[in-house]
Image: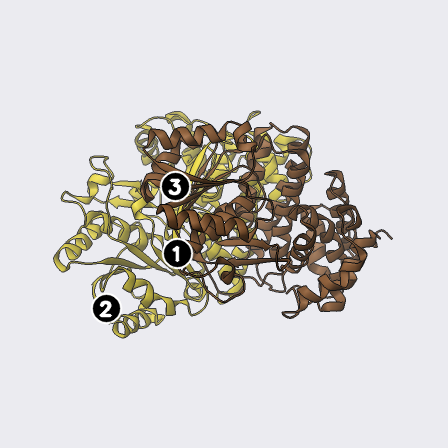
Chain colours: A yellow, B brown
């Protein structure tokens, strides 16, 4: 186990009707709120009206930034920053999933910075200050509601890049599983795959002696495998939605990565895909993950992949390689059972872009920690995932 | 799953040499520190000198309260409160295990209160303010380093009572597993039992639909079962000490109990024992736990106890009652393998006090949530644990 620091100060208000805590939380930070959200779903569900009622009951004035897209754009961020500066905003409140929250985070940082917010992604500027951020979560997926990270896309440069700062961690997040009842099956599936991918990126590590972290990771994987299909079949199953929502937050709040080197190669590759094709992040991850697992499987990585096989999938097989291969197959089958695509063609990726993506993602050096990936490795993974060759089926 | 709020703002500095972060943390809160510790072990290990060096390097003045005992006394608290008031202390720094930390917490609360600190336990006063608290942990056990609770004993009234307040949660805790290398085998065993008991109290619950919490609990139990014996056999095994130390903090920081009704009957009963006989808390818990499990096992509780059997002990048995009985036996055998006592006689409890303890602990109403326990139930458990009858062996 490596040394680590961890600090997760987000106040979580979890459960049915927890919107009742919103007013008190907001007033801690001021009475001028920038409300950030995506499309009309929060209006259809009634959540928008509930939040406006909270504002009214607590004499809170607000300005709105709506239309935040999945794979949120720096252009939305810039609009939000302008609103904050113009109206003297005290707190940025995101209502939605990870895209909306990520957008709100960078707005909050940009509002405390004189230059352009894209500077935070090109490393031209560091995020040292930000307005307070609060969230009302409507989708179990990214964990952004309890962590300091944000990923933003730039249409001009065709880049999708991440940044983070302790000042970006939400001060509070309201997690009412009922708000996710209206999430459609394909988004529920992609969200489940996203959560699992966050766990995988931290579970598959070259660091040894992290027994507690690894068992916690397996606990979260089992929860996704158990409840993902239930939430898809029964969208208003509170138990399923609640377990997925809380697991989504815990999967990327620092707990699983504490004391380990973490991988993130699959995420890095996926970001290139969604930067070019604007695909749903969790969908891209679901396609790539089994191919990544297959490609990194060797004598050295087999024991950990076999541990995954035995502890998560209850595969009783003493040979590590065979156990690992069986688990990879199970993983691919699980994603397929959620109706997620099985290859990159299906999600619109074109053969001619594979080399470009592999070049771009490795331009800052090799990827990963569980196993280091160079340009050719990434291209091989992309090619297999493009073909949908399912090489684990022997 | 029930609604919950969770907020764990403690900054954790985990790993070898993390004492290097102490100076910066302290200076956040001021430069007058009350240093609270127990006996000479921190002097023998060199930790005391390291901390004094940090004080010197950072121009921090300090006052000391030493001699804090296991099952810390309200008399120590009163001394500490007086020192805080007299010297205008900015922060209370505990160096030690749970007893020292609990003592420091109530000192910090008492320093911001005009009356006597025992009022916090008799419910005469609520803890609304406290000086900031920091800790340097030397023993994996109570989790006090990352939670808002404290338990204090009163020699005059022969009571051992708990209290808690969000203001008591340590601002920072330094967790260096190497500081626990010198913990003797019997304390390591008792600490392991204490951690496991914290998990059991939250795992065995009448609340359904808490899949993620339950899998996380099992992860922590497996860690204790795996590393407890290793830490006893090899006191300077870093991996074992690190896994136990981090698990101890996670086991009682709110994560496992979030969204559930929790039990705590075993803890309540044990507090009566250690109030009268001053036994090590974890030792008392290890004796009581299998008897409590045996006593509460019925048709209604069997499925959860059988889940424990299958998921933690890998017992493949389809009958819930038999699976549960086997797990209870395994639990008792595990504690025995750590050289912990198997009955109350061995730890000095006298038959004549059993009724008194059962009366006292149920005087404020029945105990527990997994199964409610009245006076006669508690007396039955105490009597079985006194006799050491091992009724689970059929």
* Residue A209, percent from left and from top: 56, 32
Please state the horizontal and vertical placement of residue B317, each as a whole percent of the image: 77, 51
What residue does disc 3 label?
B33
Q: Secondary structure at mark 1?
A: loop
Chain assignment, label 1 = B
Residue under numbered circle 2: A60
Residue at mark 3: chain: B
* Residue B85 disc label: none
> Residue sitting at 33 percent across and 66 percent down?
A24
Circle 2 SS class? loop
Residue drawn where x is 66% and y is 60% of the image: B265
Mark 1–mark 2 distance (CA, rounded to whole Å) = 34 Å
Q: CA distance from mark 3 to mark 1?
A: 15 Å
Q: Earlier in the sequence, mark 3 or mark 1?
A: 3
Residue labelled with disc 1: B112
Camera-side mark, 1 or 2: 1
Pointer 2 chain? A
Q: Nearer the viewer, residue A240 or A290?
A: A240
x, y (%) of residue B275? Answer: 65, 54
Label 2 crowd (10 A; few <14 / some 14-19 / many >=20): some
Image quadrant in which the C terminus of chain A is located = top right
């Amino acid at each position: 186990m490596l040394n680590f620091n961890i600090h997760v100060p987000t106040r979580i208000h979890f459960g049915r009707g927890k919107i009742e805590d919103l007013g008190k939380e907001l007033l801690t930070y001021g009475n001028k709120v920038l409300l950030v959200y995506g499309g009309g779903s929060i209006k259809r569900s009634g959540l928008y009206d509930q939040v406006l009622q909270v504002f009214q009951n607590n004499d809170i004035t607000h300005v709105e930034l709506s239309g935040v897209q999945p794979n949120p754009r720096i252009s939305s961020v810039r609009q939000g920053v302008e609103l904050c500066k113009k109206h003297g905003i005290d707190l940025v409140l995101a209502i939605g999933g990870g895209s909306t929250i990520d957008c709100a985070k960078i707005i909050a940082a940009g509002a405390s910075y004189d230059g352009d917010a894209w500077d935070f992604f090109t490393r031209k500027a560091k995020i040292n200050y930000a307005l307070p951020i609060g969230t009302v979560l409507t989708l179990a997926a990214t964990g952004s509601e309890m962590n300091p990270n944000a990923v933003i896309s730039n249409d001009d440069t065709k880049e999708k890049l991440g940044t983070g700062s302790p000042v970006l961690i939400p001060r509070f997040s309201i997690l009412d599983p009922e708000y996710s009842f209206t999430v459609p099956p394909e988004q529920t599936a992609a969200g489940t795959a996203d959560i699992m991918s966050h766990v995988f990126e931290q579970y598959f590590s070259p660091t040894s002696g992290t027994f507690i972290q690894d068992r916690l990771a397996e606990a979260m994987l089992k929860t996704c495998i158990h409840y993902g299909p239930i939430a898809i079949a029964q969208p208003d199953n509170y138990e399923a939605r609640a377990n997925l929502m809380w697991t989504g937050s815990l999967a990327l709040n620092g707990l699983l990565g504490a004391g380990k080197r973490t991988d993130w190669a699959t995420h890095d590759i996926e970001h290139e895909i969604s930067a070019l094709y604007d695909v749903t992040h969790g969908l891209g991850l679901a396609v790539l993950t089994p191919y990544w697992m297959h490609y990194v499987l060797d004598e050295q990585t087999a024991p950990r992949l076999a541990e995954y096989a035995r502890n998560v999938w209850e595969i009783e097989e003493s040979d590590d390689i065979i156990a690992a291969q069986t688990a990879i197959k199970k993983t691919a089958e699980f994603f397929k059972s959620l109706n997620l695509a099985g290859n990159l063609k299906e999600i619109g990726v074109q053969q001619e872009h594979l080399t470009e993506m592999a070049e771009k993602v490795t331009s800052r050096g090799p990827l990963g920690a569980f196993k280091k990936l160079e340009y050719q490795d990434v291209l091989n993974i992309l090619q297999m995932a493009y073909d949908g060759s399912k090489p684990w089926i022997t």
